[in-house]
Image (cartoon, grey):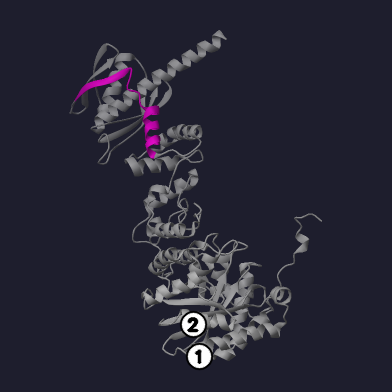
Amino acid sequence: MTAFDHRKYRPTPRVPAFDRQWPDRDLERAPIWVSEDLRDGNQALLEPMSVEQKKRFWHLIIKVGIKEVMVGFPSASQPDYDFVRWLIEENQIPDDVTIAVLVQAREHLIERTFEALVGVKRAIIHLYNSTSTVQRERVFEMDRAGITEIAVNGARWIKEQAERYPEVDWRFQYSPESFSSTEIDFSLAICEAVMDVWQPTPEKRCILNLPTTVEVAGPHHHADQIEYFCQHISRRDCVIISVHTHNDRGGAVASAELALLAGAERVEGTLLGNGERTGNMDIVTLAMNLYSQGIDPELDLANPDEIVEVVNACTGLPIHPRHPWIGEMVYTAFSGSHQDAIRKSLKKQRPDEPWQVAYLPIDPRDIGRDYQAVIRVNSQSGKGGMAFLLERDHGISLPRWMMLALAPHVQAASERVSGELSSDAIRDLMFETFTREAPLTLVDYRLARGAEEGLNITLREGDETIKLAGEGNGAMSAFMNAWQEHTGQRVSVIDYSEHALGEGSEANAIAFVQLNVEGQRICAVAQDSDTVSASLKAMISAINIARDTSERGERSGLAALVE
């Protein structure tokens, strides 16, 4: 047997057959959100947060809009105890926010927990003990009855302590820890025993939290567990079903989302998913999943950069650039076909219609991102990406034939640098490739309007001044006729495009021409103060490029002949 051998594992047992409903449901509302950043998230850090870092994180959680916050384990940690006291004594808990504290089923720990909460207006006491087969048999060496007795005693001690502080609005929560690996009938039985102690009512419901402490099966299996539990627990109207999913198989968000379909009403997680092993359920990701389906997540995620900055500062953990929804590069397209689809969709998107843009499931501006990073150009990009950047940043609208001509030059340049090209670099490359201001140069021109436009134009080539005159259907036609008469060169316009440039540009107009010069197709571009000047300069550039191309060809042919 090799070290990497699948035969030592067994699939997770299925939930007993029942009337499964969740696959046919759709989510319609946000759950009750619970932040575990200050407890579960903090516990998972190499260096736990200081009280000052916890304070900063607390303010972020409140700003985002989470209404239930697990603030720590005050009976087991002095920093947690001190933080709880700061929250209460400094009146840091808004009236619509409820703090929660975690405690094991031990009498002295429960007593210490209530001491930490003296003066609070409202709080959740979260009791837990492990229930899975492996925990029972290999950790606690107890049978089901022994494990149930631990939970019942803890529930009774909590109820007794709460009665000592009748002015506080206490809420009770119980977790059969390792629910994901616990036989479903035992999960039900132990929760029923706890409820027998607490006697919840529809007006004073208790919370039964069913955690995927270790993710041992797919999200569909977790949904089955939750729905089976919801269908078989007694006093369902007296209970809030909560889930706490971990990410061992990479399915924490999916497990929570399917659990909501299966009947869960409350979700515990952390902002950006920090937690034990591979992490907790990512609240931001699940909330944005809802948002993208037109469901109000009831959280303010309009400034994800602030969330990233605070989480990083308090935990020391970076965020992956491809992190769902808010990673630095999740709205960036390098692929040519993606860029083209995004560019065309954005042009057609109307402000008064539902969002319909290819490859962008939401409008990045909703969460503080702009279109600056949507399309970026590297060697994998196509003509659509570079066209988007030139239009967005420089107001240059490329005709399709110029896109095709420019694209291979952009790709070659990006391959040379082995990376990304900026819009400035693409613009400079376009003019470098398709503009030639010598040897033939425009000096001056005069255009006379009439039935046909007459053009008097002065050129310079080296030390020679060339004066030409011609007529035609516009300045370009007149120049082409004059040039052919002067040189005998066959020149015709294949295509042409011009437009004004926006404020802040070096010139007011840009022109693109595609000429046939003695059988060669030549593309050129020029810009100037007006469209006529830009057009004439573009034609002169095309003539210069044609000469340069012809000379290179002659030199290449001569070299081959010599060889």
Q: Position of residue 478 (x, y in %)?
A: 26, 24
Q: Are marks 1 and 2 in contact (CB under 8 Å)?
A: no
Q: Is residue 179 magenta?
A: no
Q: Position of residue 202 (x, y in %)?
A: 49, 89
Give SS at disc 1. loop
**Residue 503 in the image: above or below residue 83:** above
Q: Position of residue 163 (x, y in %)?
A: 48, 91
**Residue 83 in the image: above or below residue 327:** below
282 with respect to 179 (left or right) = left
What's the residue at 71%, 76% (across, down)? 133
- Residue 473 can be seen in this image: no
Residue furthest to the right in view is 1
Quadrant where the image shows the C terminus: top right
Q: Which residues are magenta?
A: 423-446
Q: Is residue 443 magenta?
A: yes
Mark 1 against mark 2, which lies toward the viewer?
A: 2
What's the residue at 78%, 61% (across, down)? 7
Quadrant where the image shows the N terminus: bottom right
Residue for badge 2: 114
Q: Earlier in the sequence, mark 1 or mark 2?
A: 2
What's the residue at 61%, 87% (across, down)? 153
289 with respect to 504 (left or right) = right
Give SS at disc 2. helix
Q: Which mark is residue 201?
A: 1
Identify residue type, mark 1: Thr
Camera-nearest residue between 398 and 335? 335
Q: Position of residue 206 (x, y in %)?
A: 52, 84
Label 2 environment density (alpha carbons within 10 Å; few <14, some 14–19, many ≥20)? many
133 with respect to 92 (left or right) = right
Q: Which mark is residue 368?
A: none
**Residue 295 in the image: above or below residue 231:** above
Label count reads 2
